Amino acid sequence: MVSLTDPSSGRTRSLRGTLRRVAEAAVTPLELDDVLDVFHPLRAGAPLRGKVVEVRPETAGSATLLIKPGKDWAGHQPGQFVRVGVEVDGVRLWRTYSLTHGPRADGCISITVKAIEGGAVSTHLVHRMRPGTMVQLGQAEGDFVLGDPAPAKLLLVTAGSGITPVIGMLRNLFSRAEPVRTDIVLLHSAQTRDAVLFGAELRGYADRGLIRLVELHTTVTGRLEVADPERGLAALVPDLAERTTYACGPAGLLDALAEHHDALGLPLAVERFRTEMITPGEGGSVVFTGSGTTVEMDGATTILDAAEDAGVLMPSGCRMGICFGCVLPLREGAVRDLRNGEVTTAAPGDGVRIQTCISAAAGPCHIDH
């Protein structure tokens, strides 16, 4: 072992520095990191990326992507999410997806994406992504995770693609060497039986007695009425008061669950994919002062989405108003927060910082970007 004070340690660092300078001279005018990005993009110290290993269809409109992350991937807990950046028509766009596995022996991570009508990124990932493609990654984020040990009795309430963080939790629990001792009820809503993401896997867990699965197919039964005494949670899960509830799905479902559980004093953890937006007001012309680009925006579309649709390369992160990765200075004008209707204004030159992922134009604006 070489100690920190060993002279050979200094000689080693000096040799490495010399070799790097020689290599940099050899690739000029490129940077050495540019060359390494081509031949070793997943190396430690590089911008965090991932290589798509497999694209596996789940339903007609969804697919799971298995991704090998770079050396600097810090790991994750089941239930967390990751930001993924992809090139779509020459523009890098970022979206956030739940991780659908716990830690895997092969070191890969997985996301499951449902194609959204008009969604540039989700449609690209589901229908156009190919193995071998490199994507940009953020580190895992989010606190929608089970404790260790998990609660003794769990109720998992999901709808549509809200099952994605929960499937990661279940896979992690059921892959452990020690038997799972958690009593789990999964209540899942989807339009039809065939539209249930991971349907065969979930039904397999139920057949093995690992979970009690309650499927609601909304084209037949309608949506879950949480507080309904005959068709709601109390009827479907008689021991509800004994369970800790985790829920992920549309805002309406989560709001109803929050109101219901608050009234009864029951524990509830939720994961929201996108902030519910209010009825918008007027839009306006938005000028991006750095490039001089002007984009005409309506009052219903976020500044982030409208700018990206117009080809403006924008900073972004969670796209839910949580991470503040999309913040830019508003130099002049007014924007409306689509979560609560609050209007933020700036006099010429003010530089009020706004979140573009949850703000729409409320008149002419100048944004410093």
Image (cartoon, rainbow, N blue to C red):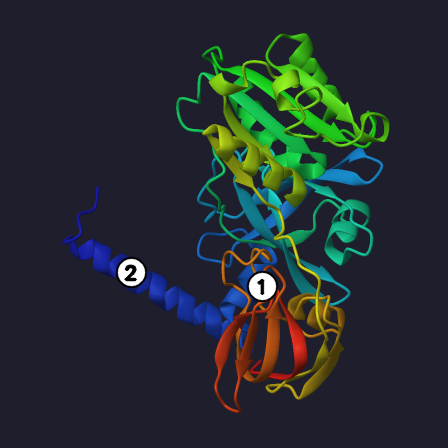
Query: Which image quarter: residue 219?
Result: top right
At 21% across and 55% down in the image, what residue appears?
Answer: 8
- The front one of 315 and 193 is 193
**Residue contact between numbered discs 2 and 1, judged by CB atoms under 8 Å:** no
The three-letter code of the residue at mark 1 reads Ser
Query: Which image quarter: residue 368?
Result: bottom right
User: In the image, which is nearer the foreground, mark 2 or mark 1?
Assistant: 1
Label 1 sits on a secondary structure element that is: loop
Q: Name the side, left or right, on which 115 lies relative to 27.
A: right
Q: CA distance from mark 2 to mark 1?
A: 38 Å
Q: Which residue is mark 1?
A: 316
> Residue 220: percent from the left, percent from the top?
85, 26
Q: Residue furthest left?
A: 5
> Residue 268: percent from the left, percent from the top?
49, 32
- The front one of 69 and 86 is 86
Label 2 sits on a secondary structure element that is: helix
Q: Which residue is mark 2?
A: 13
| Residue 332 visible in rendering | yes
Q: Is residue 194 above or below residue 212?
A: below
